[in-house]
């Protein structure tokens, strides 16, 4: 029996290989920071062929055109003859009468280098990007390396990574060969390829089991400042809490975290954060962060990505399930996919004892404040459906602010309606039981499904008013139900360059302050013609010294209204960077700040609902 089983297994493997797209990524013979990719193809289904690289990928909500990083592409027939082709656009190639097409070769440039000079293109968000640094690091977000043929997205892929023998690949995939110089993986279709990032470095990783799930954390720290073991205690505590919070909603048997720390003499990138996948996440953070800050970010950001294993990775609409990489159609429901996930990433911390109730309320307060920087009357469903269009993309980051708050209010509404028996988490659990990874829901029918799984028509009223409608959400009406009160106070006027000073970053290549492009400019910055893409080198002749940044901040606090101010900046001008001075009169930003507090003497009903909200218990 064993011999027959083995023979059948070998035969089955041979059949799969013959019908699969063998894609080889060569990390050994790297030239000029370019990696060679070879795709060996099964028999074509049609003589007319379109070959694509993704325009965008799930989870990014931006147009990135990954085909722009490809050069030297060639198409060959079964006799090794080059085939003629037409480049349709940045991502698509068309071939006629190519029924004998058997091989495609090309070179891939990385997006991290492009990110440092984004004068020609919008930079790719770093965690969804690629990095090629010979002998150091290869961050392989597979959608940046591997393309697909129309009508062959469901053909299996055999992914072969040729690697230096002393490099280790952090991934959730299982290597199917024993060679030290190659890793071989079999993936069921193109969607699984793009769902499977890898990070190759000199070995620095840890593994552990959390409630039946095997987890691997691989770390790249360019200066050697950090090791994977530095983050194990915090990570293990976080993952165990998440697994407990999700219960049977999470069925992962394995999960991989690729932590890329940017610094040293490597690419100076700005897109810090993470990107979700079914069994892994790619995370990019600055190496200069203190360990405590990285631990906190892992708890906040990596937990957010892990919660995506529930929504939208396993519970989603047809737009996500049948994702069109070449011409993507977006879903209406970022309020749930991103907002609900961000709510989980905060709620689990209070319910599992990682933060206290005052810290949780402070986070809610910050999200209310931040949401005011966006259009509060724009229907979330409309924004979500059109998020790739220029007139909507500036509203995207509100999914993490107002989106979270919508989920919170719906949570409180459900608990009020059910006398504490049901909350937002229960609703998502029921939805995931009704649908799943291989059974998508219809985008415009979601609200009917939510009414069906909860049994409350009032959920539809909430949805029509605050999610699909233009009515601003009355956060305080809901927070008062759980014994929260608001107090308004005017903050002392401050001088700074953006409305929220906490969003200020630092570029250790230019030794300048830098800002996220979604940050709102302060009145002073607007008055002197400062652009959000500018970097600040000095203020009134005082250069930025990150080691003495508190001295710099202290000086800004001495600036008076109307005082003459000179700001020295770096500004991109095509292919060059100009150092210029902007001068003007200081404008101090006066703000009324609303603080939230739990009432000292809530009613019995408020206290009961508060306890159910913060503990998740009925």
Image (cartoon, helix red, strand yellow):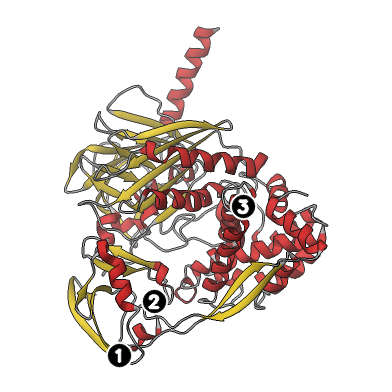
Closer to the observer: label 3 or label 1? 1
Closer to the observer: label 2 or label 1? 1
Is the residue 332 above or below the residue 17 in the image? below
Earlier along the polypeptide chain: callout 2 or callout 1? 2
Q: Residue at x 39, y 76 (%)?
A: 498
Q: Which residue is mark 2?
A: 498
Residue 527 at x, y = what percent? 34, 89
Q: Which residue is mark 1?
A: 563
Q: Mark 2 to mark 1: distance in Å? A: 18 Å
Residue 198 at x, y = what percent? 37, 41
Earlier along the polypeptide chain: callout 3 or callout 1? 3
Residue 573 figure quarter: bottom left
Closer to the observer: label 3 or label 2? 3
In this picture, residue 96 sits left or right of residue 10: left
Earlier along the polypeptide chain: callout 3 or callout 2? 3
Q: Secondary structure at mark 3?
A: helix
Residue situated in front as seen by the camera: 65 or 501: 501
Label 2 Cα crowd, 10 Å radius (few <14 / some 14-19 / many 20+): many
Q: Residue at x 48, y 41 (%)?
A: 235
Is the residue 166 above or below the residue 4 in the image? below
Q: Which residue is mark 3?
A: 350
Q: Secondary structure at mark 2?
A: loop
Q: Secondary structure at mark 1?
A: loop
Label drawn at residue 74: none
Quarter holding the N terminus is top right
Q: Residue furthest front?
A: 600
Q: Residue at x 41, y 59 (%)?
A: 55
């Amino acid at each position: 029996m064993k011999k027959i089983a083995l023979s059948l297994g070998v035969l089955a493997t041979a059949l799969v290989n013959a019908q699969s797209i063998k894609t080889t990524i060569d990390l050994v013979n790297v030239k000029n920071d370019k990696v060679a990719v070879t795709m060996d193809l099964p028999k074509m289904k049609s003589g007319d062929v379109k070959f694509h690289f993704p325009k965008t990928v799930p989870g990014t909500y931006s147009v990135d055109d990954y085909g722009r990083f490809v050069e030297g592409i060639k198409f060959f027939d079964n006799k090794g003859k080059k085939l003629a082709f037409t480049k349709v656009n940045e991502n698509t190639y068309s071939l006629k009468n190519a029924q004998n097409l058997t091989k495609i070769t090309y070179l891939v440039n990385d997006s991290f280098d492009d990110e440092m000079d984004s004068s020609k293109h919008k930079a790719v968000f770093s965690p969804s990007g690629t990095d090629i640094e010979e002998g150091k690091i290869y961050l392989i977000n597979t959608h940046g390396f591997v393309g697909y043929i129309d009508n062959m997205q469901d053909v299996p892929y055999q992914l072969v990574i040729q690697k230096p023998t002393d490099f280790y690949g952090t991934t959730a995939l299982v290597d199917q060969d024993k060679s030290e110089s190659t890793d071989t993986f079999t993936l069921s279709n193109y969607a699984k390829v793009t769902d499977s990032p890898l990070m190759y470095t000199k070995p620095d990783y840890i593994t552990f089991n959390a409630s039946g799930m095997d987890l691997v954390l691989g770390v790249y720290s360019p200066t050697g400042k950090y090791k994977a073991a530095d983050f194990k205690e915090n990570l293990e505590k976080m993952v165990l809490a998440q697994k407990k919070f999700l219960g049977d909603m999470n069925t992962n048997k394995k999960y991989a975290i690729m932590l890329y720390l940017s610094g040293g003499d490597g690419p100076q990138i700005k897109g810090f954060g993470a990107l979700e996948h079914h069994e892994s996440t790619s995370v990019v953070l600055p190496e200069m962060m203190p360990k405590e800050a990285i631990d906190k970010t892992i708890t906040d950001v990596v937990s957010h990505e892990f919660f995506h294993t529930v929504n939208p990775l396993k519970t989603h609409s047809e737009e996500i399930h049948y994702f069109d990489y070449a011409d993507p159609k977006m879903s209406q429901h970022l309020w749930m996919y991103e907002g609900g996930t961000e709510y989980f990433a905060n709620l689990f911390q209070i319910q599992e004892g990682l933060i206290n109730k005052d810290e949780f309320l402070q986070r809610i307060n910050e999200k209310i404040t931040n949401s005011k920087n966006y259009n509060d009357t724009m229907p979330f469903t409309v924004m979500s459906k059109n998020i790739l269009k220029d007139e909507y993309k500036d509203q995207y980051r509100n999914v993490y602010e107002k989106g979270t708050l919508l989920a919170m209010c719906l949570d409180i509404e459900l608990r009020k309606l059910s006398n504490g028996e049901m909350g937002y988490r229960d609703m998502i659990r029921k939805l995931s039981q009704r649908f799943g990874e291989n059974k998508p829901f219809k985008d415009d029918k979601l609200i009917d499904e939510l009414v069906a799984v909860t049994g409350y028509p009032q959920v539809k009223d909430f949805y029509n008013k605050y999610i699909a409608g233009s009515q601003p959400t009355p956060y305080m009406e809901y927070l008062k139900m759980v014994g929260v009160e608001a107090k308004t106070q005017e903050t002392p006027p401050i001088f700074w360059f953006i409305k929220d000073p906490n969003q200020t970053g630092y570029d250790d290549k230019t030794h300048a302050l830098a800002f996220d492009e979604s940050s709102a400019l302060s009145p002073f910055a607007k008055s002197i013609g400062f652009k959000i893409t500018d970097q600040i080198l000095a203020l009134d002749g005082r250069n930025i010294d990150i080691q003495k940044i508190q001295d710099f901040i202290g000086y800004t606090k001495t600036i008076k209204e109307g005082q003459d101010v000179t700001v020295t900046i770096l500004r991109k001008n095509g292919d060059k960077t100009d150092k210029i001075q902007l001068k003007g009169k200081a404008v101090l930003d006066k703000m009324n700040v609303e603080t939230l507090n739990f009432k000292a003497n809530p009613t019995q009903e408020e206290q009961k609902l508060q306890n159910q909200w913060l503990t998740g218990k009925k």
